[in-house]
Image: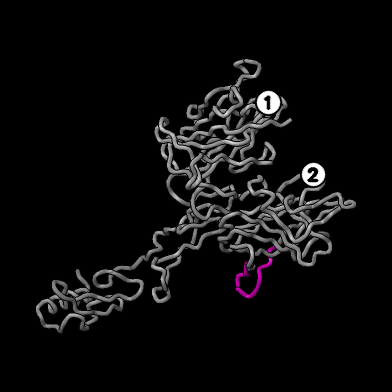
Amino acid sequence: MLGPRLLAALCGALLCASGLRAASGDFCDSSQCLNGGTCLLGQDNTPFYCLCPQGFTGLICNETEKGPCFPNPCHNDAECQVIDDLHRGDVFTQYVCQCPHGYTGTHCEITCAMPLGMETGSIADSQISASSVHLGFMGLQRWAPELARLHRTGIVNAWTASNYDKNPWIQVNLMRKMRVTGVMTQGASRAGSAEYLKTFKVAYSVNGRKFQFIQDAEGTGDKIFVGNMDNNGLKVNLFDFPLEVQYVRLVPIICHRGCTLRFELLGCELNGCAEPLGMKDNTIPDKQITASSIYRTWGLNAFSWYPFYARLDKQGKFNAWTAQTNDASEWLQVDLGFQRQVTGIITQGARDFGHIQYVAAYKVAYSNDSKNWTEYKDQGAIEGKPAPDSSLAPDTLALWPCLASWACCSSSCCSCCPASPGCPSTMASTTPTIPMAGTWAMATAKASSMG
């Protein structure tokens, strides 16, 4: 049986329909609307309508409004917050997702806490600078900024500021704007004693000239990050909000014995994608990796360096692809299975019975049918672009590094993703984007040898 308020609403609708009410837009008997709704006269075939208070909806405000946050549209346990219509400004979404640390994107769908390349060497020595350098043992030991790489070993294995530096800092130039979400720090041992940063600040810049510090949650001053407690443990500090910057600077505040640091920046690409496609983890199967030739040590099939060995960080005596000859006609090819947007390549050398081998330079071509190939070129260039020489060690991961070759030997990894933005990145050098392609090939353009 219908309730009295619903009957009143239906009765009011009939009265309005019979023309016993005023013009459209005038108020009518609000008892027709439930839950405190305001009754307004309608027009045409609508006798009246109810202006419902917040939290209610429906023809007569008889339904509870669940809102844009139900069900929660945010991913990774992010909190959905409804935006008040009165304070929306130029924001036209009905909600925002408050992402947990390490995630970003409209719906917190993007993982953004990947190492950016300090430890792997993707961030080159030339990208790291500091306010000063400590010179130890009669000036023979140089604790330089380029040594400030996580887990670096050796007697001199970190950056240390000069004892006379009253305002020390170390900074990284990422070469382009990236999304930086945190930092991982580590101390080191110098002259047998532990040294590390107890506390520090983080400053950032888009141009390398004007820096500003990350502020505390209250916005009352620079945020002080808690550092390490010993020389070898790791301390992760994730920022409250991601930074979209090119330069990141760490400023020691309190140091134990000396301001000594090894560190890694965490984050992801600002735009585009740089997620490994599957050479390393075997997502790309062996049959999709081919080459112009195969080198066989001593001519024995059992000692063959097959194309599908060209996987990053592969272990074993035979752990890379090696071409039969050391010339520019050799190539390695990967069938991606379907169209992907390729943004870069990581390469790595290997050893053949003690001999260091790596590709010194190469060109990249791409195709959608494996028959018609296009060389990757800089905009406006006539010739294809060879990747530049690099002085990185053969075991170092780098983007476009052109690492290897005594005989053309290479482990490689395609960095790309499906045609959608927002993939996390482990790389920090400038990355050209290769158009959509289903197959790519790396052709050796120059080779060199090392001892």
In the rendered view, tell whether residue 299 sits above or below residue 329. above
Q: Is tag 1's residue or tag 2's residue first in the polypeptide sequence?
A: 2
In the rendered view, tell whether residue 86 sits above or below residue 393. below
The residue wearing badge 2 is 154
Foreground pick, 134 / 53: 134
* Dot in front, 1 or 2: 1
The quadrant holding residue 159 is bottom right
Percent position of residue 389, x then y: 64, 40
Percent position of residue 96, x then y: 45, 64
Foreground pick, 390 / 393: 390
The magenta-colored residue range is: 214-225
The tag on residue 403 is none
The residue wearing badge 1 is 352
Mark 1 residue type:
Asp
Q: Is residue 369 magenta?
A: no
**SS majority, magenta:** loop
Q: Give the structural element (helix, strand or loop) at label 2.
A: loop
Could you tell me which residue is drawn at 66 percent across and 45 percent down?
121
C-alpha distance separating marks 1 and 2:
26 Å
Q: Give the structural element (helix, strand or loop) at label 1.
A: strand
Mark 2 residue type:
Gly
Percent position of residue 90, x then y: 41, 71
